[in-house]
Image (cartoon, rainbow, N blue to C red):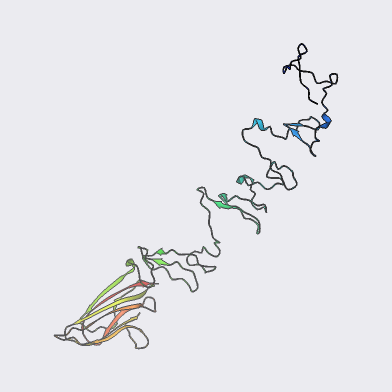
Amino acid sequence: MDYQYVKLVDGTPDSTAKIQGTEANGLEVDVTRLPSLAAGTAFAGKVQLTDGTSDATVRNLAANDALNVAIVDGAGNQVTTFAGSGGSSATDNSAFTAGTTADTTVAGFYQSTPTAVTDGRSAAIGIDENRRVKVSVDASTLDLAHGVADSGNPVKVGHRVQTALPTAEVNNDRTNSIADEYGRQLISHISPGMQVWKSFNATTTQTGVVVWDPAAGKKIAITSIEIGTYGTTAARVILFFNTTTTYTEGTHQPVFKASFAPSATVKPGAVQSFSPVIYSATADAELRITTDAGISIDVVVYGYEFS
């Protein structure tokens, strides 16, 4: 049934007239006909509709510019901290504890002195004060010093500059690879600073005369020899290593043997480079020359000394 307001004076409609909705005038509203509230606690703003109490955990969206989102776990509980049942904190490195089994997204943090972590536990990568990742090796196996017993796998790729041959190491030791002062790796040759040369001349018979006397405790390595003859006296020439003037065939170490017969028109000689070089087998052994006649001869020798 529809109702409208009319003026009592003339019966015309009056939209401004109002009748109070009370039981006395028959306009009372039956609120029991409103639909029932959904199961659970419902809120209007921050007021609980069931009992009119305020719920302080519900944010006042009108007082916030951005939309607030509540995060709940699998059981429907709101997660208010990432240290609880909803997960673990990964906001910064202050929440990370080294040596724990908890997950972490921390990539690295500054460690002046890194501490050990138990096998199977998580650990952050250590960085230096310039945020460079720290990389180190096990000093007992990889980062070994020159001249100590070898172990582990080799990792060195650089060379050490040597302008004089280093001291020999014992069998099965690890050694540094060496290069000359220009960075060229030394395999079987030498740096210019290691080179030694000797020049010898004779016109009379020689018996174990010294051509090259090495430094105390050193051995001679010969890389090349040049021999030239002149005059008209023929002779057999022998160059050898020994600590005395004696040359015994099959006993003392020979370097060069040849016979030369120079004449007024022919001046024989020899030029020879050695690869690999000729090494003296004995420390302190001199390079010596013996001739069986007074041949006129020039000898030039290049090489180096080693321990």
The residue positioned farthest toward the top in the image shown:
9
Which percent across, then down, holds residue 77? 74, 43
Quarter of the rendering containing residue 4: top right
Q: In this view, does 213 lie to the left or right of 260?
A: right
Which percent across, then down, holds residue 171? 49, 74
Which quadrant: the N terminus? top right
Quarter of the rendering containing residue 34: top right
Which quadrant: the C terminus? bottom left
Which percent across, then down, holds residue 20? 79, 18
Q: Which of 279 and 25 is in front in this view?
A: 25
Which percent across, then down, holds residue 304? 34, 72
Q: Nearer the viewer, residue 108 or 276?
A: 108
Q: Nearer the viewer, residue 297 or 278?
A: 278
Q: Is residue 148 left or right of residue 289?
A: right
Quarter of the rendering containing residue 190: bottom left
Count the labels in the image: 0
Q: Is residue 97 left or right of residue 292?
A: right
The residue positioned farthest toward the right in the image shown:
24
**Is residue 259 in view?**
yes
Q: In this view, does 117 lie above or below 4?
A: below
**Is residue 110 in view?**
no
Instruction: Kindly identify the residue that appears in the image at 78 percent across and 32 percent down.
Output: 49
Q: In this view, does 221 lie above or below 257?
A: above
Q: In this view, does 31 lie above or below 294?
A: above
Instruction: Kindly identify the residue that appears in the image at 43 percent across and 67 percent down.
Output: 177
